Amino acid sequence: MRAFYKGGFQPEMNRREAALILGVRESAPEEKVKEAHRRIMIANHPDAGGSSFIAAKVNEAKDMLLGKKTGGSSIF
Amino acid sequence: MAAKIIANLLVAGGTVLFRAASQAYRQAIVNGTRAGMTAEGVQQAAKSAKQLTLREAEMILGVESGSSWQDVMKKYEHLMQANEKNGSFYLQSKVYRAKERLEQEFQEQGLPTDGPEGGQQQQQQSGGQ
């Protein structure tokens, strides 16, 4: 049985952590990232008994992996 | 004869490289300390992710401070199950570590942590309050 990762989340998320959160490779294609995000978000949805903290992390992970991919051209 | 020359060259080359490397190393440390990166600073940065604070543990599980152990276990089991099926191992780990941290906190305060029922059988004498 695999040993659980130690400690809490990183103080500032990076691509590596984002990939781990979504269970995909850092180089995963956009479709895979979106699919993983959807699936994990449903499982961790705050309205369905999940934690909003985790939900926020899952969203942040998706943004991080997708944002860099499309060149991060958004000014927001 | 040629071998001797080659050997000398190798030794000389090696010495030059070694000296350059150690000088670079020392310079890197100086540059680092000037930029505020000390040995303890680096350790602290690595630690802050490892030291799961009580607050973060509560946020991960979505419980408020002062929740009962029952509430903690309910959230823990729900999250573990949900992420076992449709989450990532990484998220499972965080949930596990959060529960571990809260367990530690409860035990330090001398509160019962045995199972969802919240300790009807066990009597825990707390050391001090």
Image (cartoon, helix red, strand yellow):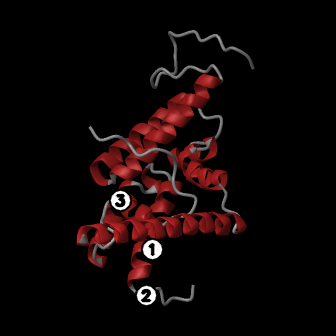
Mark 3–mark 1 Cα distance, whole angstroms, equals: 14 Å
Circle 2 sits in a helix, a strand or a loop, which is it?
loop
Q: Position of residue B51 (x, y in %)?
A: 58, 44
Amino acid beneath label 3:
Ile
Mark 2–mark 3 Cα distance, whole angstroms, equals: 24 Å
Q: Residue furthest front?
A: B1
Q: Are marks 3 and 1 in contact (CB under 8 Å)?
A: no
Q: Nearer the viewer, residue A41 or B23?
A: B23
* Residue at the disc numbered 3: A40
Q: Are marks 1 and 2 on the same chain?
A: yes
Which residue is found at the position 56% from the left and 52% from the top? B46
Q: Residue furthest left?
A: B2
| Left or right: A12 as drawn, with respect to B127 | left
* Residue at the disc numbered 2: A71
**Relative to A14, does residue A51 appear above or below in the rendering?**
above
**Relative to B36, does residue A47 appear above or below in the rendering?**
above
Amino acid beneath label 2:
Gly
* Residue at the disc numbered 1: A63
